[in-house]
Amino acid sequence: MTEQTKTLAVVTLGCKVNQYDTDSVVTQFLDAGYSVVDFDEAADVYLINTCTVTNLGDRKSRQMIRRAHKKNPNAKVVVMGCLAQTTPDDVAALEGVTLIVGTNGRTGIVREIEELETGEQKSLVEDIFEISDFEDIPSLDFSGRTRATLKIQDGCDQFCTYCRVPFARGPSRSRPLSSVLEQAEQIVALGYKEIVLTGIHLGLYGADLNPPLTLAEVSEQVANTKGLLRLRVSSVDPHEITDELIELVATHPVLCRHMHIPLQSGSDAVLRRMRRNYTSAQFRTIVDKLRRRIPKIAITTDIMVGFPGETEEHFLETMNLTRDVAFSKIHVFQYSKRAGTKAASFPDQIPSNEKEDRSRRLIHLGEALAERFHSSFIGQNVDVLVEQVQEDQAIGHTDNYVKVVFPVPATVDLIGRVVPVRVVKADTTGVLGDFNAEGVTPSVK
Ligand code: SF4
C-alpha cells in the first residue's frame, strides 16, 4: 500500500514580497513530498502568510487562521509573516496555531512542523532588528504560469511615520548578485517569460553589499538572462529613480516601460509629516524625465488619503498632481492608525466618512485617467504576453502594463507567447483587441 501524500493549504495576505516568501516556503513543502490543496479543503498543514500594513490586513489574517482551524481542527497551522513578527503573542493566543514564524528564520519550517504534534505550539520569531543578512531561500514554485516574482531585497530603514513595515521586516538587506542571477536563470529554465524584481524598499538594493551595487546595475544583469522576455521593476520611490535606471528602461529591450512610483500625497506639508524624503516638485520632475525619455511609459502609483491633518486643500493638491501626472493606475488606500507608529499619536485624525469621500473621488479620477491611457492605444498594434486563455478569450499584458483581452480559437495555445494584437476598444480596466497572426507585424519598442 502506498503512503498517502500529506497536504498543504496556503493563503497569502498582502504584498508581492509576501507572495514570494510564501512561494519559497511552498517550494520546501513540495520538496518534502507534500501536495498543495485548496484552502477550503481539509488539509494536514495550513500555512497563513500574514500582513499588518493596515487594520484590514490584521483582521483578514486572523480570519484565515480561524478558518483553517475550523476546517480541520486536527491540522497543524503555521502562521508566518508581518503580523506574526509584530504581535507573536496575539497570534499564539489564537486557537489551533501550531508554529509561529516571523519574517526571517524560514528555512527549517517543514522539519519544525513535523516535529510538533497537533495541539503543541512553538515560536521561531526572532528579534528582527538583530538580522543583518538577506535570508536566501530560493523559490521554484510561483503562483502564475508566465510571470514570476524575484525578491532581491528585504527590510526598510526609512520609518515613514504611518508605516509599520520596518518593525515587521527589520533593516534593509540585499540578496547577493550571484544568488539573484542564479535564481533568475532557474526561473527562465522553468519556462517563465517575465520576472518582476521585488523588495520591501527596492530603491535601497545593493547599498549594504560589498562592493555596493545599484538597482540599475542588478536590473541590467537580470535583464541579460538568456531567454528572458520581460523584466519589470516593481516599485521605486521617486528620489531613488536614477538617470542610470531611466536610461536602462529606455534602452534595454527586456526592461518593461512601466514604473510604479508611490506618491502617497501631492501636498508637501503632508509629505513632510509622513517623512517621505521628496517634494511634490521633485516627483513632477522625475515623471517629466521619464516621459521625455520613454514615450508611452505606464506610471502607476499608491496614494494614501486621510493622513492625520490632511485638509481639503491638501487633498486637492493630491488631486491636481494626480491629474497632471496622469497615472495609468492608482492604488488608493485610506490611512489607518497603526500601533507603534509616530502618526498614530498625531492630532487631527480624519473622520472615516471624510476618508471614504476622498477615497471615492480619487478612485473616480484614477478610473478616468486609466481609461484615457488605455484609449490612447486604439488603432495601434501592441505586443501582448499571454497569461491565460479562458474558453475562447486570451488575457495578457503589454510591457507597459495594459491588460489586453482578445478572442482566439480554443485550439491555439498562446500561453507564454508574446503576440501582436490590434487594439479596438478601451475601458477603465484595459483594452479589447483583435489577434491576427498573419496580418499583423509585432510592434517594436
Ligand atoms: S519606505 Fe516608508 S512606506 Fe515604504 S516600507 Fe519603508 S517605511 Fe514603509
Image: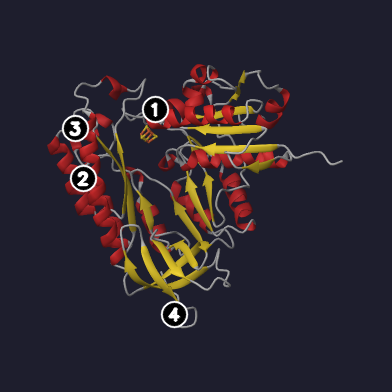
Which x, y percent locates residue 321? 20, 48
Pointer 2: what residue? 361
How many residues crowd around disc 2 within 10 Å: few (fewer than 14), some, or many (20 or more)? few
Give how far apart the Cα atoms at labels 1 and 3 are: 20 Å
Q: Mark number for residue 38? A: none
Secondary structure of the residue carrying numbered label 3 = loop
Residue assigned mark 1: 164
Q: How far is disc 1 from disc 4 in space, using C-alphas? A: 49 Å
Tell us which disc is closer to us: 3 or 2.
2
Which quarter is ligand 1 in?
top left
Dot 1 falls on a residue whose secondary structure is loop
Do the numbered discs 1 and 4 sit on residues whose CB atoms are within 8 Å?
Answer: no
Give the percent coordinates (x, y) of residue 384.
Answer: 45, 66
> Is 56 or 339 nearer to us in this picture?
56
Task: Indicate which disc, 2 or 4, sits on the residue closer to the N terminus.
Answer: 2
Q: Is residue 115 above or below residue 400?
A: above
Q: How many marks?
A: 4
Instruction: Please identify, in this view, whether the residue under mark 2 or under mark 4 is nearer the observer.
Output: 2
Q: Amino acid at mark 2?
A: Arg
Q: Position of residue 163 (x, y in %)?
A: 36, 29
Q: Are marks 1 and 3 in contact (CB under 8 Å)?
A: no
Quadrant assignment for the C terminus: bottom left
Q: Which residue is tagged 4?
A: 440
